[in-house]
Amino acid sequence: MERVRKNKKIYYAKEADVLWFFVKSGPEIEYKEIAPGISVELGESGELLGIEILNASKVLNPILSQKQMQIPAN
């Protein structure tokens, strides 16, 4: 699947509970899971285009709650 990155740097889809960090624009050529629920999206030369976190509220809220921040749960 080829995806072209937009200018937005961070995007959260509440209904899917997915958080994306966009690093660089370009077509996504490869997608690798680096830890359960955490994947990186790579470009033609293997450059990092973005990071995707599934179940973001469950993964990040224990960490963020220490800083008094929360990702809205579904």
Image (tube, rainbow, N blue to C red):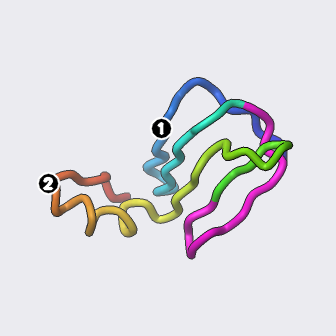
Q: N-terminal of the two: label 2 or label 1? A: 1
Label 2: few (<14), some (14–19) or many (≥20) C-alpha neighbours in 10 Å: few
Q: Which amino acid type is shown beneath numbered disc 2?
A: Gln
Looking at the rendering, which quadrant does residue 73 occupy?
bottom left
Q: Which amino acid type is shown beneath numbered disc 1?
A: Ile
Left-right relation of 71 to 14 = left
The residue identified by callout 1 is 10
Residue ID at (16%, 62%): 66
Say which element carries label 2: loop
Q: Quadrant of the C terminus?
A: bottom left
* Residue 9 at x, y percent in the picture: 51, 33
The residue identified by callout 2 is 68
Q: Is residue 51 magenta?
A: no
Left-right relation of 63 to 11 = left
Say which mark, if any, is on residue 31: none
Magenta residues span 26-39
